[in-house]
Amino acid sequence: MPATRALRVLIVDDEALARQRLEDLLRREDAVEIVGTADNGQAAIEAIAALKPDLVFLDVQMPGRTGLDVLREVGPDHMPATIFVTAYDRYALDAFELAAIDYLMKPFDDERFEQAFRRARRMIELAELGRLSEQLRAVLKREEQAQAAAAPTAPARSAYLERIAVEMRGQVRVVPVQTIEYITASGPYAEIHVADKTYIIRERMQTLEERLDPQQFFRIHRSVIVRLDRIDSLLREPGGDYAVQLRSGARLSVSRNRVEPLEQWMGLAR
């Protein structure tokens, strides 16, 4: 593409804060025009067709139609250059990395963004769109193979997270879900507590609750999810409030409307 023309960029993410962060980072770059944003898969499909961006930052996990659904609908041959954005290592490590597609793992730092953006700009300027199409096609093939392999043996396994990827100082670390004691909300972030360590990811508690096995994890408060087998006791505090004491010694508040289902799980009669 000619060096004098601004790179036309579309941002797709269902989180307003995530879209704003990408906008802020892109506004620091020269010769970039943010042509639009979208907060769901269907809007992304329509925006790609109408706006014809050169580059799309595409969130993978969105309610309704996911980023991969967008890719299927638009088709690899008609898809702009794409940088995937994801909070889940199953997508990034298995699909995109193996297919040589660039991606940003939430939460990503400025340096990682810069690396992905520069690579995408270079590929677009070199008109390597045929190569990009092949890479996108490889992503879909990889995902289809993963789904086919999982279906006959463990159809429900992929429904819940087994690992969560966290990015620290530009490095990705995989945290096995089975090691998590509890998760707390901190603004737009979630803090994952594992023994004496705390990892931070940019993710909503509602999304995490939906993707964690309910037989193992329970949301005891709007800002707290706890691993059930880490609970040592249920405590009644002054004023009628409740808390759980974990085996590690951590003490966490329990919302009153969550006490009864928690007692049922613990086998306590009311």
Image (spheres, grey):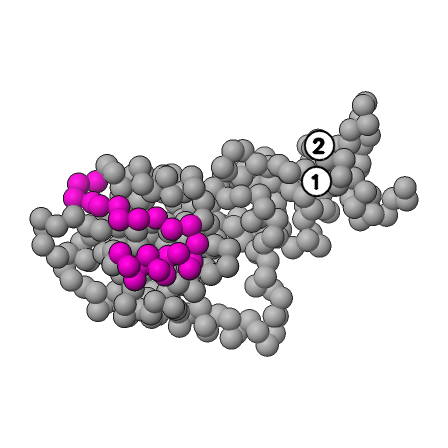
* Above-or-below relation of 257 to 69: above
Image quarter for residue 195? top right
Q: Is residue 237 visible?
A: yes
Tell me where the magenta segment starts and ends, as one range: 29-51
**How many angstroms separate mark 2 from mark 1 (CA)?**
7 Å
* Horizontal and vertical percent position of residue 103: 35, 53
**Residue farthest right in this picture:** 269
Q: Is residue 173 visible?
A: no
Q: Which residue is mark 2?
A: 253
Mark sitting earlier along the chain (2/1): 1
- Which quarter shows the C terminus? top right
- Which quarter shows the N terminus? bottom left
- Residue lying at 19% horizontally and 50% vertically, measured from the top left: 7
* Horizontal and vertical percent position of residue 74: 34, 67
Left or right? Give the position of 216 relative to 186: right
* Above-or-below relation of 155 to 251: below
Residue 200 within the magenta-colored segment of the rendering = no
Q: Which residue is mark 1?
A: 220
Kind of residue sitting beneath label 2 = Ser
SS for dot 2: strand
SS for dot 1: strand
Left or right? Give the position of 187 relative to 115: right
Q: Are marks 2 and 1 in contact (CB under 8 Å)?
A: yes
* Above-or-below relation of 204 to 124: above
- Residue lying at 30% horizontally and 62% vertically, measured from the top left: 49
How many numbered marks are there? 2
* Horizontal and vertical percent position of residue 148: 51, 75
Kind of residue sitting beneath label 1 = Ile
- Residue lying at 37% horizontally and 57% vertically, measured from the top left: 44
- Residue lying at 57% horizontally and 43% vertically, measured from the top left: 205
Q: Callout 1: few (<14), some (14-19), or many (20+) C-alpha neighbours within 10 Å?
A: many
Decide which of 207, 41 is in the foreground and name it: 41
